[in-house]
């Protein structure tokens, strides 16, 4: 199930599924650890002797955000109960505290007592071994703790803060399902402590006048020990939860609206999704620099692994968007992360955990004959330098570049100069950006060209002319070799890759692949070059999904999450990023405001296939338009933002030229 809402502050991230259940809670890093990694946290209501969880069919709801902020706007209505709940959720922008405001509206004539139940299904450090939960009489809250992580849940619905009723217990052992079952009669047992595989439930009661409303609050504070968490709990009580919710509401509006982009000519829905995308990108960005691909733990059910890693490629493409949005501090932290994690040989690994340790990988260190190969995607190294070049161009901040120059920029550039295919001069074989094939890939070649050009500019800036000439020469050689070996005259387009056989032959892979759009994105080819134009037209014609849903597939005969074998009609599922690559090119080559409408139409296509909250998945179902794979995917949101930025820049140029 996709994550419809994600709220966070760079240390604490909370994500909700489409039923408004908390499914992921990450701390102390975005993406590490998920302390809610198995079953949902349930939210239930008891009134007039009847109980239901909000997942019951009698509840209907909409999950959205307030405009331009990271505060939710959730509305749940139950005609059988005669109740409406209006909820606002956020993570405080400064402290690791999740807060929820619940307005309970009575749709009946008489006054009523309503009990709200909050269930906690923690698996601290994702294993559920040796956890403890207990009722704390000091705060009247519920504590879950293990090692150096402690959560305190609390609520406030009357004159005094604290739960009115609690239950702690064992789950999934000896036939016990959990304390959530204890709540279903409207009462809780009061068991004060449990250890091992545990859960807890707390309840509060609100009195709602006839046709009126009442307010309750709930929060989770998290830290590394009891008294620091208690201090945060006490702050919520003393300042009032609404104060923290509203200050966070204002902070994120300030954060996302301070850009100076001129949105003239863009549909308001596109502008809204741009700001939503920037905010969602921020929720997936750890304060220590890692930009996480996605934090939807449901993907764990398919391969016992997740997207909760930083791929340097994804991170570089995301940080490029943050740079264009003037978020220089977040960009600086990303480059510091890359400095900490680059290998002594000058290359970035496949992916990293949010704390900088190497992530899981399926790229081998040896070929089938046992010979050593590097388990890398070289574009991940190259794009870090490409993005750093964009940072320098926009901010001209020599103090940031100085400590990065020798250990990151030169080290990576020297590696890219060395790591070449001896016969062609192209980058040597590595894994592709889709992590499926080994060879010399057009996307990788283009990214290495862009990375070396950036390195050459840095070297000249530091007065190292010999190094600058070396990097420039290598880039020029790669560009010349790309036009010779990767542009197919017969096909009249750039090809996906060259497969290098054991005996050294170069076998062209003619599969149409959206990633070859990197030829213009990273400067290898001018977007108006006839070879680039022909290539992009072939992508548009062959990869467009020919159903009512539309969109651009990754490549012909894509197998990932495939739902149809009708390849001629559905070459693969539509991907947001691939559709947006086409939109970016359409914007880049536009000669008039009328030409820009082609890009605008593709952006509206994305808007129409986002979840109501504005969240973008990785893919959509080619027949239903429903989200597929993880959601939100940080890369999808970054490419949408990049498309808007490209559109705005090109529109400004056209207006300046009088077009």
Image (spheres, rainbow, N blue to C red):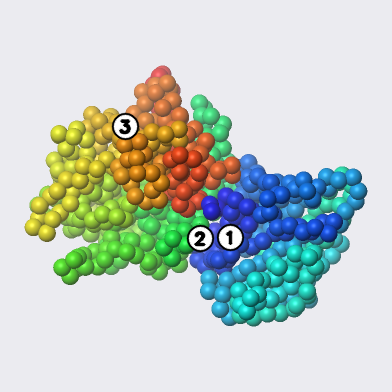
**Which comes sooner in the sequence, label 3 or label 1?**
1
Front residue of 373/383: it is: 373
Q: Residues within 10 Å of mark 2 (few under 14, many from 20)?
A: many
Q: Secondary structure at mark 2?
A: helix
Q: Are marks 2 and 3 in contact (CB under 8 Å)?
A: no
Tag of residue 297: 2
At x 28% / y 53%, what residue is drawn?
A: 432
Task: Indicate the position of residue 20 as horizontal and vertical percent values.
Answer: 64, 53
Task: Indicate the position of residue 659 as horizontal and vertical percent values.
Answer: 40, 19
Side (left or right) of 79 relative to 598: right
Side (left or right) of 101 relative to 130: right
Query: Residue reaching furthest top?
Result: 658
**Which comes sooner in the sequence, label 2 or label 3?**
2
Q: Is residue 500 visible?
A: yes
Front residue of 112/499: it is: 112
CA gap, disc 2 to disc 1?
8 Å
**Which comes sooner in the sequence, label 2 or label 1?**
1
Q: Are marks 2 and 1 in contact (CB under 8 Å)?
A: yes
Tag of residue 23: 1
CA gap, disc 3 to disc 1?
40 Å
Q: Residues within 10 Å of mark 3 (few under 14, many from 20)?
A: few
Residue hosting label 3 = 541
At x 33% / y 52%, what residue is drawn?
A: 434
């Amino acid at each position: 199930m996709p994550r419809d809402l994600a709220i966070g502050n760079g240390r604490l991230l909370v994500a909700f599924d489409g039923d408004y259940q908390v499914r992921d809670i990450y701390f102390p890093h975005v993406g590490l650890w998920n302390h809610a990694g198995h079953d949902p946290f349930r939210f239930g209501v008891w009134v007039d002797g009847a109980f239901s969880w909000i997942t019951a069919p009698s509840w209907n709801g909409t999950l959205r955000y307030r405009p331009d902020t990271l505060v939710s706007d959730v509305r749940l209505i139950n005609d059988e109960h005669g109740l409406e709940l209006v909820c606002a959720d956020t993570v405080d922008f400064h402290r690791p505290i999740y807060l929820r405001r619940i307005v309970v509206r009575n749709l009946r004539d008489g006054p009523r007592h309503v009990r709200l139940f909050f269930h906690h299904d923690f698996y601290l450090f994702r294993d559920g071994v040796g956890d403890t939960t207990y009722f704390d009489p000091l705060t009247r809250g519920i504590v879950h703790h293990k090692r150096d992580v402690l959560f305190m849940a609390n609520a406030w619905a009357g004159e005094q803060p604290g739960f009115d009723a609690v239950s702690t217990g064992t789950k999934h052992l000896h036939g016990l399902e959990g304390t959530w079952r204890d709540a279903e009669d409207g009462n809780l047992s009061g068991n004060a402590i449990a250890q091992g595989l545990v859960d807890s439930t707390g309840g509060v009661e609100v009195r709602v006048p006839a046709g009126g409303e009442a307010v309750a609050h709930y929060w989770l504070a998290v830290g590394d020990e009891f008294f620091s968490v208690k201090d945060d709990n006490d702050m919520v009580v003393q300042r009032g939860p609404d104060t923290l919710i509203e200050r966070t509401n204002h902070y994120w509006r300030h954060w996302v609206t301070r850009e100076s982009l001129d949105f003239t000519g863009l549909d308001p829905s596109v502008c809204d999704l741009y700001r939503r995308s920037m905010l969602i990108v921020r929720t997936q960005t750890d304060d220590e620099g890692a930009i996480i691909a996605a934090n939807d733990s449901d993907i764990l059910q398919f391969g016992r692994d997740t997207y909760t890693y930083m791929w340097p490629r994804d991170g570089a493409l995301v940080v490029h968007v943050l740079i264009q949005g003037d978020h220089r501090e977040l960009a600086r932290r990303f480059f510091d992360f890359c400095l900490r994690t680059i290998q002594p040989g000058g290359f970035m690994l496949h992916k990293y955990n949010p704390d900088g340790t190497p992530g899981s990988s399926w790229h081998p260190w040896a070929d089938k004959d046992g010979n050593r190969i590097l388990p890398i995607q070289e574009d991940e190294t190259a794009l870090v330098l490409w993005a750093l070049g964009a940072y320098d161009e926009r901010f001209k901040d020599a103090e940031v570049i100085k400590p990065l120059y020798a250990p990151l920029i030169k080290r990576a550039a020297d590696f890219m100069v060395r790591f070449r295919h001896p016969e062609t001069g192209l980058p040597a074989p590595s894994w592709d950006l889709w992590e499926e094939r080994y060879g010399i890939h057009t996307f990788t070649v283009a990214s290495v060209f862009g990375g070396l050009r950036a390195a050459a500019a840095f070297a000249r800036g530091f007065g190292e002319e010999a190094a600058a000439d070396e990097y420039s020469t290598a880039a020029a050689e790669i560009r010349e070799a790309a036009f010779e070996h990767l542009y197919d005259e017969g096909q009249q387009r750039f090809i996906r890759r060259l497969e290098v056989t054991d005996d050294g032959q170069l076998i062209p892979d003619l599969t149409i692949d959206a990633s070859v759009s990197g030829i213009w994105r990273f400067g290898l080819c001018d977007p108006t070059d006839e070879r680039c134009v022909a290539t992009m037209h072939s992508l548009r014609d062959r990869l467009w999904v020919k159903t009512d849903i539309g969109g651009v597939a990754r490549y012909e005969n894509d197998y990932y999450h495939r739902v149809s074998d009708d390849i001629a009609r559905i070459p693969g599922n539509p991907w947001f990023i691939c559709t947006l690559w086409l939109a970016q090119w359409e914007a880049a080559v536009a000669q008039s405001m009328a030409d820009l409408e082609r890009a605008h139409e593709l952006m509206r296509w994305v808007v129409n296939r986002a979840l109501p909250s504005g969240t973008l998945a990785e893919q959509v179902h080619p027949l239903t338009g429903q989200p597929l794979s993880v959601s939100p995917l940080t890369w999808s949101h970054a490419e949408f933002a990049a498309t808007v930025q490209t559109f705005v820049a090109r529109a400004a140029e056209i207006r300046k030229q009088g077009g």
